[in-house]
Image: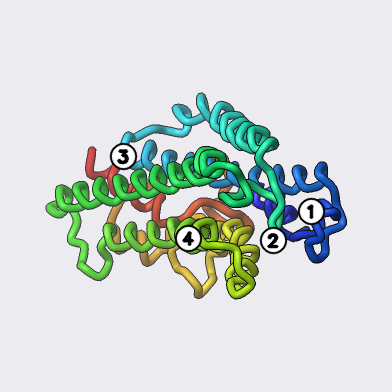
Amino acid sequence: DHIYSSIGFAFASSLAPEELGIQGAKGNDATCKFQGFLIELGITSTVFNLCLSVYYWLVIVRGWTDSDLQKYRGYVYVGSIIIGLSLATAGFPHYVSSFRECHIHPPPMAESWWPIILLYIVPISLCILGSTTAIVLVILHVRRKEIKSKQFSARSKKSSLTRKCVKQAFYYLAAFYLVWPFMFVPIFLPLSENLQWMYVLTSIIGPSQGLFNFLIFFQRRNTQMNPFFCCRKSTTEQADTNLPRVPPVTSGLQSSDDECSSSWTLPNTFNAIWEHCHHAQL
């Protein structure tokens, strides 16, 4: 879905109606609305990020298994797509052109603030709030379990699982907080040629959430960038945690216990968190 919004941003002002006299405009009303639809459709990926945060909460805090999640997986995929398509379709009457791109804009380009608030600001804000809440609940749960299980595991401060969880949560939520402030700020600023640098920055950073997600979730085992991304726990970490071997929690992705470099999976730290909490409950 970020691919669609990236395509929409890439057209810039070229799809705006030519009669408006905007520099580079070569389109018409139909192409303008098509661009707005593509950009708005990018919200679908933000909804998927929210669902992934809830997934972590269900598995780590609520103790759901893969069989429990399998029952609702189809509903999550279809529901997220429907939400994105519904928002993008509802925006058709409100897609207008600025000198940047065609999308939902605030006054004076629109008659009211309500379209951009209801179709853009509120959905994204709810997704960010929900994702942050779910991850914070995971951290608090892990912290409680770690304190409770100290009598069973002599874990040093340096190797604290809570510390690793907070670090992983920071990386995960950074995909939101590095992108959306740049998307929201220009909404409340008046159009000005002096702010063109910000509009250019917004057009670059806006579609980059998909790249940030890629960097966070799909690091190979031997990378030096982040040692917490791996398809299985390293021998050192297994010895450090002193926990029983438990099959890693994945989201439908295949992993291999023998060959880490040939497969992809979810962050290793969250798998370790699941193992730790599971051990504390035994």
Q: Write down the residue under mark 2.
A: 100
Mark toward the start of the polypeptide (1 vs 3) = 1
- CA–CA distance between discs 1 and 3? 48 Å
Quarter residue 95 falls in: top right
Q: CA distance from mark 2 to mark 3?
A: 44 Å
Whether residue 260 is visible, yes or no, is no
Residue 184's tag is: none
Q: Which residue is mark 4?
A: 181
Query: Which quadrant of the rendered structure holds the C terminus?
Result: top left
Whole-number angstrom distance, CA of label 1 to CA of label 2: 9 Å
Residue 152, given in percent of the width and then of the height, sits at: 16, 52
In the depicted structure, whether residue 190 falls above or below residue 141? below
Q: Nearer the viewer, mark 2 or mark 3?
A: 2
Q: 41 or 211, which is in the foreground?
A: 41
Tell me: 1 left or right of 23: left
Q: CA distance from mark 4 to mark 2?
A: 18 Å
Q: Which residue is mark 1?
A: 16
- Residue with the mark numbered 3: 61
- Tell me, yes or no, whether the two marked residues, 1 and 3, touch with CB atoms within 8 Å: no
- Residue drawn at x 51%, y 27% is 72
Amino acid type at image mark 2: Arg
State which tag comes first along the sequence, 1 or 2: 1
Q: Residue at x 57, y 58 (%)?
A: 209
First along the sequence among labels 3 and 4: 3
Other residues around mark 2 within 10 Å, as few (<14) / some (14–19) / many (≥20): some
**What is the three-letter code of the residue carrying label 3?**
Val
Above-or-below relation of 278 to 78: below
* Location of residue 109 in the rendering, given as x and y in whole percent from the top left corner: 63, 50
